[in-house]
C-alpha cells in the first residue's frame, strides 16, 4: 500500500491582485525550496492564476483553482472549465467550498458533476465537506458529512478515486479562529475514511488523502497533522502570510512541538511548511503487511511536488 503524501492547499480566496499574488508566490517558493515529502498547492483567485502559474512553473509548488464549471465549454457566462484551468497549468481545484455552497447556492449534485469533470481532466479535486454549528449541535455532523461526501464522489470509478482529495472543513471553524479539537477532527476524518472504504474498498480508502480546514495555522497544524487520518490541510487566512510579511510584524505564530533548527523555524513561518515538520515526525501510513517496495506515486495531480 502506498504511503499518503501530505497535501497542503493554500486557499487565497478573493484576495490579492496580480502583483502581490506574484510576490507571495515567490516568497512561498523560496521558503519551501528545500521542502520534500509534502505536496503544496497555491490556489489564487482566477485573475492571478496565469501570473502565479508562471512563478510556480518548474518548482515543486503546484497551481490550483478555487472553483470551476462542470462542462468543458458552453454558454455559461463568467464560468471557467476544467480544460481552461489545465491550459493555465492548474493541477488541482477546490470544489464545493462552504462559501460557494452558502453564498452561491452550490449544491451537492453540482459538486459531484464538477468532481467528475475534474478527475476526467486530470485535475485533482479538493472536495470540501463539513457541518454548520447548528448541525453539530443537533448531533448530525456525521450524517451531513456522509451525504456531502457520497454525493460528491458519486459516479467516480475506483480507478480515479485516489486522484481525489477530501477536505473536512467544519463551517464554524472557517475564518473564525475556532479550530476543531484534534479529537473532533480525527473522529470525522476516520468516519470519512470509512465512507471511502465502503465506496471503493479499503485499499483505495487508505490511498486517499483527507485534509482538515478551518483556522489551521502553524501553531495548531502539527497537532492536527499528527492525527492518524489527517493527511494535510486546506488553509485560508494563514496562507496569506509569508515569512517576509511575518517578520515585518509581530510574529503571530508560535511553532511548537517541532524541531527547533533555524531552518524549521523559518519554514514554520509559512503554514504550508507545517507539512515539512509533519513529514519528519510521523511515519508514513501504510496498509499492514504491504512492503515499502509497493509504494506508488500519488495519483493524478499530485506527483510533481514530492
Ligand atoms: P481559514 O479558511 O483557514 O481562514 O479558516 C479555510 C478555508 O476556508 O478553506
Image: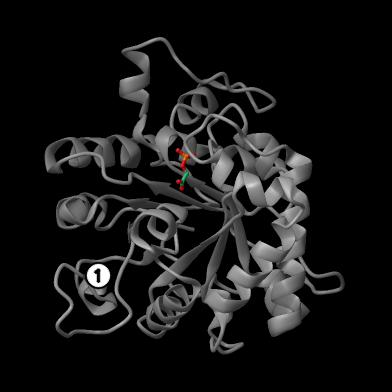
The answer to which of 163 and 96 lies nearer the viewer is 96
Seen at 17% across and 85% down, the residue is 74
Residue 85 appears in the figure: yes
In the picture of the structure, the residue carrying the numbered disc 1 is 85
Residue farthest top in this picture: 250
In the picture, residue 278 is in which quadrant?
top right
For the residue pair 131 and 57, the one nearer the viewer reads as: 131
Q: Residue at x 50, y 26 (%)?
A: 263
Say which residue appears at 31% left-offset and 53% top-offset: 59
Figure quadrant of residue 209:
bottom right
Task: Give the quadrant of residue 199.
Answer: bottom right
User: Looking at the image, is 97 positioned above or below residue 116?
Assistant: above
- Residue 153 vertical position relative to residue 42 in the rendered view, above or below: below
Of the pair 143 and 306, the residue shown nearer to us: 143
Q: Is residue 148 above or below residue 284?
A: below
Q: Secondary structure at mark 1?
A: helix
Farthest residue toward the right? 289
Q: Position of residue 34 (x, y in %)?
A: 44, 41
User: Measured from the top left, where is residue 285 in percent x and y?
Assistant: 74, 60
In this rendering, position of residue 173 left or right of residue 96: right
Q: Is residue 279 above or below residue 215?
A: below
Which of 31/136 is in front? 136
Residue 170 position, x and y percent, is 60, 48
Amino acid at each position: 500500500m502506498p504511503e499518503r503524501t501530505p497535501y497542503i492547499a493554500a486557499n487565497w480566496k478573493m484576495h490579492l491582485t496580480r502583483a502581490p499574488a506574484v510576490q507571495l508566490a515567490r516568497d512561498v517558493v523560496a521558503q519551501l525550496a528545500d521542502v520534500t515529502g509534502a505536496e503544496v498547492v497555491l490556489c489564487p483567485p482566477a485573475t492571478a492564476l496565469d501570473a502565479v502559474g508562471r512563478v510556480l512553473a518548474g518548482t515543486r509548488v503546484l497551481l490550483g483553482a478555487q472553483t470551476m464549471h462542470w462542462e468543458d465549454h458552453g454558454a455559461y457566462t463568467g464560468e471557467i472549465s476544467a480544460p481552461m484551468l489545465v491550459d493555465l497549468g492548474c493541477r488541482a481545484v477546490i470544489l464545493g467550498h462552504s462559501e460557494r455552497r452558502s453564498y452561491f447556492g452550490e449544491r451537492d449534485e453540482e459538486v459531484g458533476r464538477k468532481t467528475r469533470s475534474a478527475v476526467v481532466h486530470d485535475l485533482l479535486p479538493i472536495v470540501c465537506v463539513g457541518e454548520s454549528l447548528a448541525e453539530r449541535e443537533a448531533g448530525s455532523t456525521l450524517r451531513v458529512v456522509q451525504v456531502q461526501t457520497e454525493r460528491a464522489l458519486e459516479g467516480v470509478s475506483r480507478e480515479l478515486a485516489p486522484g481525489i482529495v477530501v477536505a473536512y472543513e467544519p463551517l464554524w471553524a472557517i475564518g473564525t479562529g475556532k479550530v476543531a479539537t484534534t479529537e473532533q477532527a480525527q473522529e470525522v476524518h476516520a468516519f470519512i475514511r470509512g465512507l471511502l472504504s465502503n465506496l471503493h474498498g479499503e485499499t483505495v480508502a487508505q490511498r486517499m488523502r483527507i485534509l482538515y480546514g478551518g483556522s489551521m495555522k502553524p501553531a495548531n497544524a502539527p497537532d492536527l497533522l499528527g492525527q492518524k487520518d489527517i493527511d494535510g490541510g486546506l488553509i485560508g487566512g494563514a496562507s496569506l502570510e509569508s515569512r517576509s510579511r511575518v517578520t515585518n510584524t509581530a510574529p503571530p505564530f508560535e511553532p511548537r512541538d517541532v524541531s527547533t533548527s533555524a531552518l524549521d523555524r523559518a519554514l514554520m513561518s509559512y503554514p504550508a511548511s507545517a507539512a515539512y515538520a509533519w513529514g519528519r515526525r510521523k511515519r508514513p501510513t501504510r496498509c499492514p503487511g504491504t512492503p515499502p517496495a509497493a509504494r506508488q506515486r500519488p495519483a493524478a495531480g499530485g506527483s510533481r511536488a514530492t
